[in-house]
Amino acid sequence: MQPHSVSNKCSIIIPSPRWSKLAFIASLVSASVLQGCIATPTSGLERMSNAMVYGEMSFDDPEIVVATSGPVDIDLESFGGTVVVEAVPGLQNTIIEPVRRARHGHLRRDDAVSSLDAMDYVVELIPGDLDRETVRIVASSSGAESHFQGIDFRIRTADLGSVKVRTGRGRVWVKNNTGGVDVQTTHGDIRVITLHPMNDPIVLVTKEGEVDYRAPKGSTGIYDLRSIGGLVYNRFTQARVISTSAENGPAIFVAEVGGGLNPVLVRTTYGDIRVAVTENPTGVGPVIME
């Protein structure tokens, strides 16, 4: 397998000395497969299920360590795949864990394996104003059947600013951002939960997926939430709903919350939307019911 592309604009990127094993787990189940949390792209349980049910083949690329300091914004554009972005206090750099996946079916596993080389990505570190930096990732595929492919990314940094993600056929989870979030995906859930008050624009759009947005006291917004084929739920225990729209119903919620003018726009089809400004927004498990 050829190494991925690294832009000359990027600051020093050092591959980890720890290589992950090939995750060819279509028929064998080991103890290592059962480790991990289902919330991450490299989840053993999820990948075991994908391999056994869909014949998916996958490969863990070596993790990428980007030398960053201060607030880091994430800008990711991909042809497809799951993305998890989270703030982890105490990290000295930004860590990126890519996983290439191909799902051609049980009878075409050889095609799936050979297609892994058709996927590539470029990582750039772009200096911003003052102490801000942006880590930009662009993933692509030269394969003729890219709709069977995807690259998952788990991204961790100490001080997560804003997040922008464009992907498809995958979920996008963002945790403890301090800036605005702009996510568009398809056939995947979106989850944005943070302990930091949100007064920046939030745009979350998916298709055939559910959306959860949870923020703490001090968060504001002009909310415009709409689901086709699903329901919209709202829970504001730590914010005041100042005004609402006459068009509100089971699948629509339009309101001014907390006195702020920042847009909070959420759209999905055949999935539910849940928003909350609550005391402990990140105190949830893998499944959010409220």
Image (cartoon, rainbow, N blue to C red):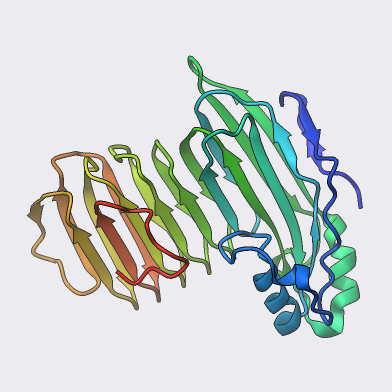
Which one is nearer the viewer's eye here, 94 or 125? Answer: 94
Q: Is residue 112 above or below residue 63?
A: below
Q: Position of residue 193 (x, y in %)?
A: 39, 52
Residue visible at 77% across and 72% down?
31
Q: Is residue 107 above or below residue 103?
A: below
Q: Position of residue 154 (x, y in %)?
A: 63, 50
Q: Residue furthest top?
A: 130
Residue visible at 27% across and 69% down?
232
Q: Position of residue 267 (x, y in %)?
A: 36, 61
Q: Position of residue 36 (x, y in %)?
A: 65, 63
Which one is nearer the viewer's eye here, 5 or 20? Answer: 20
Which one is nearer the viewer's eye here, 16 or 247? Answer: 16
Q: Is residue 89 left or right of residue 229?
A: right
The picture quadrant where one finds residue 133 is top right
Residue visible at 65% across and 28% down?
125
Question: How many numbered dots are placed on residues in this image?
Answer: 0
Q: Is residue 232 left or right of residue 30?
A: left
The picture quadrant where one finds residue 274 is bottom left
Q: Is residue 255 left or right of residue 146?
A: left
Where is the C terminus found, in terms of image quarters?
A: bottom left
